[in-house]
Image: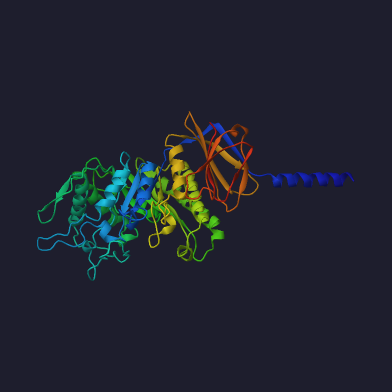
């Protein structure tokens, strides 16, 4: 009878332990590190951002309201007439310079980000500058997607003067009030904008099949030329699609550059994607696993940067998630937007801990034919979606210079939740996210009673985070919820 009672007590204790939910613990006096990270986003030029488009006003109003720094602007090649200012090669004293379709969207970007640092990247080189078997044509309709406007690996002008002259004129259009073209004709713009950062091309490991060596030569030539007309501009290099160590080893070695070429900042990208034909039920595991793999890679790349060029900053300026091709051709569910928003919050915490300077979400506007799964704006009505609201919630509350303090979650059910507490001496914030497609209740410290909590979840939809007050010792986080707790 005595042994049975002991066994019964053992089972009772085991069941209590197993039933206990996760608990959040924060040690405000235990500093982990000081953040140097700035959250931001990229804006890819496309027809939905043209004046008169259905979501133009909503998108640019959201961008202005966000007030982020280091916003990356990338007019990109699938819409040649919206991104290339000289679509045809000069012939017999005639040129094709035309900013009439490019200017409205670009000026709206400048105005929406006024007062904040930006990273400009007109990444698309005019296709006629490359050697190809036959001339590459472009769609006459500026709104028609044209994935064939690309190709060619060798510039027709090996000196790269033709290439750099194009960009000098383009930059002069926006910063010097105009330029003189190849035929000696002056083109007046009247624009006098500042360009704090210029990123040299986009995904060169993919577009035009560059090698680290050929890209570095183009980078040096571009920087040398651009500094003559915009001496205050700093430069971002690489913008890699894939995290290939050999690129960082080569590019970050000052010995591989011409004397005096700055290595102000490097950039690269990550999209946590679903596998082909994978059903949504499995996304929560695949996307976060791929995010973890990327974070491991980031730490390795950081070791290369610190060894070769420690003063160079890092901007991971395309962070997003992709659905499978099957799901992309269907209406995308609210649950996906919340999952993707949760993944960005997870990236933000992990990359802040890795010491990354700029953490950029991709992208302001996507839509069918233009990666709808990375949009931060509902492309049917122009309202900011959960991905935007999580970015804004982080940007408004967590700053470079904030202190990360010791934070953990005691749990018997794995790593379903992730949290990090921040302090700036006058206020305290805790960013916490649910990685799973289920509601989870979490026990919070007694000091959190009465704290404000902002939440982006399935209930907030395309609206701003919901606001509430913690009145009990637990809070419930709905599937893929992202919360910001303000204890004081």
Q: Is residue 250 visible?
A: no
Residue 456, given in percent of the width and then of the height, sits at 51, 46
Residue drawn at point x = 32 percent, y = 44 percent: 112
Q: Quadrant of residue 138?
A: bottom left
Residue 184, given in percent of the width and then of the height, sits at 9, 54
Looking at the rendered structure, the number of numbered marks drawn on it comes to 0
Colour logic: rainbow
Q: Is residue 402 above or below residue 270?
A: above
Front residue of this view, candidates 64 and 234: 64
The outermost residue toward the top is 426
Residue 260, given in percent of the width and then of the height, sits at 24, 43
Residue 183, given in percent of the width and then of the height, sits at 10, 56
The outermost residue toward the bottom is 133
Q: Along the horizontal axis of the image, is 363 left or right of 227?
A: right
Residue drawn at point x = 65 percent, y = 47 percent: 412
Q: Is residue 474 visible?
A: yes
Front residue of this view, candidates 375 and 432: 375
Q: Is residue 178 above or below residue 205?
A: above
Q: Is residue 420 above or below residue 218?
A: above
The outermost residue toward the right is 1
């Amino acid at each position: 009878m005595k042994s049975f009672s002991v066994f019964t007590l053992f089972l009772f204790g085991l069941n209590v332990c197993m039933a206990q939910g996760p608990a959040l613990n924060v040690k405000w006096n235990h500093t982990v590190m000081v953040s140097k990270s700035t959250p931001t986003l990229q804006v890819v030029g496309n027809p939905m951002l043209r004046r008169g488009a259905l979501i133009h006003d909503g998108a640019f109003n959201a961008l202005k309201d966000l007030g982020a720094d280091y916003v990356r602007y990338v007019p990109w090649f699938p819409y040649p007439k919206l991104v290339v200012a000289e679509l045809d090669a000069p012939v017999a004293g005639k040129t094709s310079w035309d900013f009439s379709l490019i200017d409205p969207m670009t000026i709206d970007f400048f105005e929406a980000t006024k007062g904040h640092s930006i990273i400009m990247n007109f990444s698309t080189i005019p296709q006629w500058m490359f050697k190809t078997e036959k001339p590459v044509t472009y769609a006459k309709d500026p709104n028609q997607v044209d994935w064939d406007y690309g190709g060619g690996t060798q510039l027709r002008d090996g000196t790269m003067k033709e290439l750099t002259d194009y960009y000098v004129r383009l930059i002069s259009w926006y910063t010097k009030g105009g330029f003189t073209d190849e035929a000696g004709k002056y083109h007046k713009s009247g624009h006098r904008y500042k360009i704090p950062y210029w990123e040299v091309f986009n995904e060169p490991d993919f577009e035009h099949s560059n090698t680290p060596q050929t890209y570095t030569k183009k980078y040096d030539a571009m920087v040398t030329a651009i500094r003559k007309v915009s001496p205050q501009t700093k430069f971002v290099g690489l913008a890699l699609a894939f995290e290939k160590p050999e690129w960082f080893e080569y590019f970050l070695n000052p010995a591989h550059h011409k004397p005096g070429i700055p290595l102000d900042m490097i950039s690269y990208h990550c999209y946590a994607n679903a596998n082909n034909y994978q059903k949504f039920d499995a996304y929560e595991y695949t996307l976060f696993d791929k995010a973890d793999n990327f974070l491991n890679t980031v730490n390795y790349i950081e070791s290369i940067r610190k060894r070769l060029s420690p003063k160079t900053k890092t901007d991971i300026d395309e962070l997003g998630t992709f659905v499978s091709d099957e799901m992309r051709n269907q209406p995308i569910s609210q649950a996906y937007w919340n999952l993707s928003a949760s993944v960005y919050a997870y990236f933000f915490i992990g990359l802040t801990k890795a010491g990354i300077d700029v953490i950029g979400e991709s992208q302001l506007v996507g839509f069918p034919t233009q990666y709808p799964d990375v949009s931060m704006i509902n492309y049917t009505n122009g309202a900011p979606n959960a991905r935007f609201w999580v970015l804004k919630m982080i940007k408004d509350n967590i700053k470079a210079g904030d202190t990360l303090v010791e934070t953990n979650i005691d749990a018997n059910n794995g790593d379903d939740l992730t949290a990090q507490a921040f302090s700036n001496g006058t206020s305290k914030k805790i960013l916490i996210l649910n990685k799973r497609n289920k509601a989870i209740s979490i026990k919070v410290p007694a000091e959190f009673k009465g704290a404000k909590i902002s939440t982006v979840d399935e209930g907030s939809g395309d609206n701003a985070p919901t606001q509430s007050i913690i009145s009990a010792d637990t809070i419930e986080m709905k599937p893929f919820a992202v919360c910001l707790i303000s204890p004081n």
